[in-house]
């Protein structure tokens, strides 16, 4: 009955032992008070609310740089281009161990009532977030944008906005996230300028890059 506490500055591979432990807590760089902080988390005195800023792979071979690792003497050639992190895993349909934006809590949250107001220069996205558990907690809703009719090669989805929200047990708040006009665009190498293509875009609200709770499609002209 073991809980593994990992103090690292980057993802680690866990495939040899992850199925043999009861829980995993990533503390990153804890600092001088790291011991007291992790004790509060393990004992339930504090509800952890962190979200992963990176993707944890199931195995080293799943990483985007694997095929070019040390391809030159003592050097690694990074051929990822724009497909780093969750973009690489999405494009190649690789299931991560823990996706970008993932993070558990001692409480639970429910997403509902998505509304999108496309005003042109700014798009307003609102939805209700409810703490359905028994203790206070913080959630980080994430807004991802997918270009469904893109004329160029683009990621499956791109993180465009997020917000950390604190909720008491049973509390519901209306969360508002904004999409700027430039968020729909991409940099065109041929014209050396930013462009926005007309077409359909899917707005996804989720708890991580792989757990999208609410979706709506809009058209940009």
Image: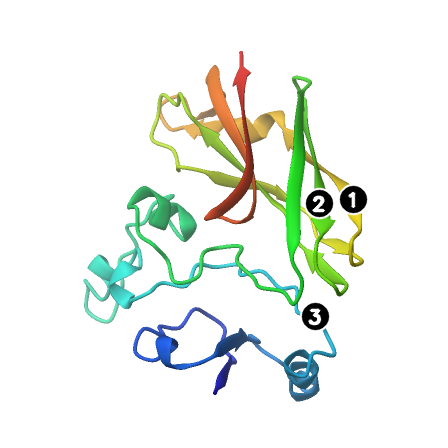
Image spot of residue 46 (x, y percent): 73, 74
At x 48%, y 59%, the residue is 54
Q: Secondary structure at mark 3?
A: loop
At x 51%, y 43%, the residue is 212
For residue 73, side relative to residue 117 (left or right):
left
Q: State if disc 2 and disc 1 touch (CB < 8 Å).
A: yes
Q: Is residue 50 above or below residue 14?
A: above
Label for residue 129? 2
**How many residues crowd around disc 2 within 10 Å: few (fewer than 14), some, or many (20 or more)?**
many
Lower sequence index among marks 1 and 2: 2
Mark 2 → mark 3, Cα distance in angstroms: 18 Å
Q: Secondary structure at mark 2?
A: strand
At x 43%, y 81%, the residue is 21
Mark 1 → mark 2, Cα distance in angstroms: 5 Å
- The residue beneath circle 3 is 47
- The residue beneath circle 1 is 173
Residue 203 in sight: yes
**How many residues crowd around disc 1 within 10 Å: few (fewer than 14), some, or many (20 or more)?**
few
């Amino acid at each position: 009955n073991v809980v593994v506490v990992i103090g690292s500055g980057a993802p680690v591979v866990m495939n040899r032992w992850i199925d043999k432990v009861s829980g995993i807590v990533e503390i990153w760089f804890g600092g001088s008070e790291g011991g007291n902080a992790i004790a509060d988390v393990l004992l339930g005195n504090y509800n952890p609310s962190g979200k992963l800023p990176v993707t944890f792979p199931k195995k080293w071979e799943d990483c985007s740089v694997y095929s070019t690792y040390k391809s030159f003497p003592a050097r690694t050639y990074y051929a990822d281009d724009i497909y780093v992190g969750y973009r690489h895993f999405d494009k190649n349909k690789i299931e991560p161990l823990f996706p970008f934006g993932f993070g558990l809590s001692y409480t639970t949250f429910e997403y509902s009532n998505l509304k999108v107001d496309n005003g042109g220069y700014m798009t307003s996205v609102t939805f209700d977030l409810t703490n359905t558990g028994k203790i206070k907690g913080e959630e980080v809703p994430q807004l991802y944008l997918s270009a469904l009719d893109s004329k160029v090669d683009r990621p499956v989805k791109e993180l465009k906005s997020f917000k950390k929200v604190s909720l008491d047990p049973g509390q519901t708040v209306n969360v508002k996230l904004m999409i700027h006009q430039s968020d729909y665009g991409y940099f065109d190498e041929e014209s050396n300028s930013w462009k926005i293509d007309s077409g359909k875009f899917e707005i996804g609200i989720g708890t991580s890059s792989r757990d999208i709770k609410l979706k709506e499609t809009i058209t940009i002209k």
